[in-house]
Amino acid sequence: MADYQNIRTEIRGRVGIIRLDRPKSLNALCADLVRELGQALDAFEDDAAIGCMVLTGSERAFAAGADIKEMKDKTYQDVFLEDFITVGWEKVSRVRKPIIAAVAGFALGGGCEMAMMCDFIIAADNARFGQPEITLGTIPGAGGTQRLPRFIGKSKAMDLVLTGRMMDAAEAERCGLVSRVVPLAQLMDDAIATAEKIAGMSLPATMVAKEAVNRAFETTLDEGIRFERRTFHATFAFDDRAEGMAAFADKRKAIWKHR
């Protein structure tokens, strides 16, 4: 396991866990943290024994945002030339294996945006979500103005982005930002159990299922259905598809080869 300074990693069976770990700054997303996160994601992506990932923080904060101290003195030329926020940040959204965000406490600004890059969010009952960049004289820069309306609708997204207010876990579940809310004490057990269930499926099937669902946000319904149909057809080349259907017919548990 790599020696990280800003994150911690753990493996539970076929589940890879990444915990953001900058407690003094409420897991503010500095450049070094984002770089290490990318390394950990790549390691789990390349590990054939990992079938699902969980990204989490602490009980106080998933991540309270990007590191303002790191960016406050930057100029336009600085951020433009280095393509600030882009490099490394989108890595979470480009992971091919399923990834769950387990969110407790604050998920604000870049923290909210990073949670939205995951495939779905399981929230503790103390979770708080928001895009407060407007209070700093700027706007979200890691997808907040784009993903948030897709997930919760224009009106609610405008409300959050223009006022900078936080919404609690119950509101986040009501508007579809999170898949479910659990007591704080049960968050990691629930997230890991969910990840274990996903990791217990055929890996290629979960990867193409994820790709098909994500296509819904990038294309028309007609083209999305066509993509789904062709992807469904393609699963008939999988050893696991043949095994899964044979196991169903034989009334036995499938034995996946992840091929």
Image (cartoon, grey):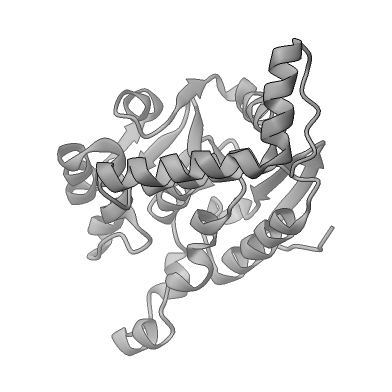
* Residue at x-position 56% and y-position 53%: 27
Q: As displayed, is residue 51 above or below residue 79?
A: above
Q: Quadrant of residue 255?
A: top right
Q: Quadrant of residue 259?
A: top right
* Residue at x-position 41% and y-position 80%: 83
Number of on-image labels? 0
> Quick check: 115 left or right of 109?
right
Image coordinates for residue 152, horizontal then vertical, percent: 27, 37
Viewer can see residue 40: yes
> Quick check: 231 left or right of 49?
left
* Residue at x-position 59% and y-position 45%: 207
Viewer can see residue 57: no
> Quick check: 174 left or right of 88?
left
Q: As displayed, is residue 34 above or below residue 117?
A: below
| Viewer-side residue, 25 vs 259 | 259
Find the residue positioned furthest to the right: 1
Q: As displayed, is residue 115 above or below residue 248?
A: below
| Viewer-side residue, 257 vs 175 | 257
Image coordinates for residue 53, horizontal then vertical, percent: 66, 43
* Residue at x-position 26% and y-position 54%: 145
Image coordinates for residue 143, horizontal then vertical, percent: 34, 57
| Viewer-side residue, 30 vs 231 | 231
> Quick check: 44 left or right of 231?
right
| Viewer-side residue, 200 vs 30 | 200
